[in-house]
Image (cartoon, rainbow, N blue to C red):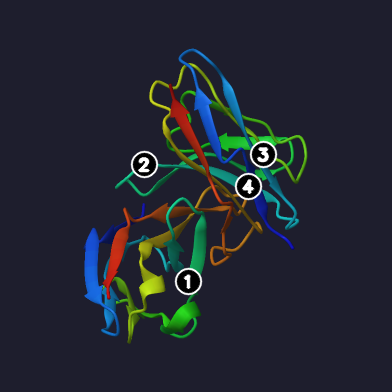
Amino acid sequence: AQSVTQLDSHVSVSEGTPVLLRCNYSSSYSPSLFWYVQHPNKGLQLLLKYTSAATLVKGINGFEAEFKKSETSFHLTKPSAHMSDAAEYFCVVSAILSGAGSYQLTFGKGTKLSVIP
Amino acid sequence: DGGITQSPKYLFRKEGQNVTLSCEQNLNHDAMYWYRQDPGQGLRLIYYSQIVNDFQKGDIAEGYSVSREKKESFPLTVTSAQKNPTAFYLCASSIRGARGNTIYFGEGSWLTVV
């Protein structure tokens, strides 16, 4: 079984300051991990993903995340927040659905990021 | 442009009615999924399909039904048996087979019971 815990339901930062969104996971095998972003009334867009290659993953819009196996964490960071970053962010771990080779995503409950001008 | 199209964007259902949400993809993906999103709950899997004419229940399938007659299409019917259907519904698709494959999402559909 796998699970994802996003440690903050709401994060508020000032424009131009760093962003840190925290995510811890549990998985019975080597996981794939994802961060998705959702703007209001929209679908989810992939920011970045980790699939057992480099532990520091760079994504779109200046975001990056570091996979730390010893801490079972996959925190999302950005050096400088922009107003357009205000959205909800989901940390996700993959899980096998069945022996036929399909995978289910297990979602965290989301972190809402507010950016103050 | 390749992508996933969900329709309608907004749908209102009366008590006791069945309604169907459409999902079409032109990404040539074998696997398709339906998720339900409620505020503060993340996304929960309703049904998934790995291949045409096959689908499986997810975590919250009660009160929902699906079909997969074509690779491109995976409609979701919300039946009158679903007691609390008001939510945001997201359709998604992916390539089969590898745990690192990205799942792509449509823009979502809002369903409200009136």
Sequence-wise, which precedes: disc 2 or disc 4? 4
Quarter assignment of residue B68 = top right
Label 4 close to label 3 by CB (< 8 Å): yes
Count residues near mark 4 (Cα–Cα under 10 Å), then give few for <14, some for 14-19, many for 20+: many
Q: Amino acid at mark 1?
A: Leu
Label 2 close to label 4 by CB (< 8 Å): no
Quickly name the residue at label 3.
B74
Helix, strand, or loop for circle 2?
loop
Q: Amino acid at mark 2?
A: Asp
**What separation in Å lies between label 2 and label 4 (alpha carbons)?**
20 Å
> What chain is tagged by disc 2?
B
Q: Are marks 4 and 3 on the same chain?
A: yes
How far across and how far down the image is residue B89, in percent? Answer: 50, 41
Res. B38 mark: 2
Label 2 close to label 1 by CB (< 8 Å): no
Q: Residue at x 43, y 21 (%)?
A: B114
Helix, strand, or loop for circle 3?
loop
Res. B80 mark: none
Helix, strand, or loop for circle 4?
strand
Quickly name the residue at label 4.
B32
Quickly name the residue at label 1.
A47
A102 over A13 or under it: above or below: above
Q: Are marks 4 and 1 on the same chain?
A: no
Count residues near mark 2 (Cα–Cα under 10 Å), then give few for <14, some for 14-19, many for 20+: few
Q: Amino acid at mark 4?
A: Met
- Residue B64 or residue A14, whichever sits in front: A14
Q: Are marks 2 and 1 on the same chain?
A: no
Count residues near mark 3 (Cα–Cα under 10 Å), then give few for <14, some for 14-19, many for 20+: many
**What separation in Å lies between label 3 and label 2 (alpha carbons)?**
21 Å
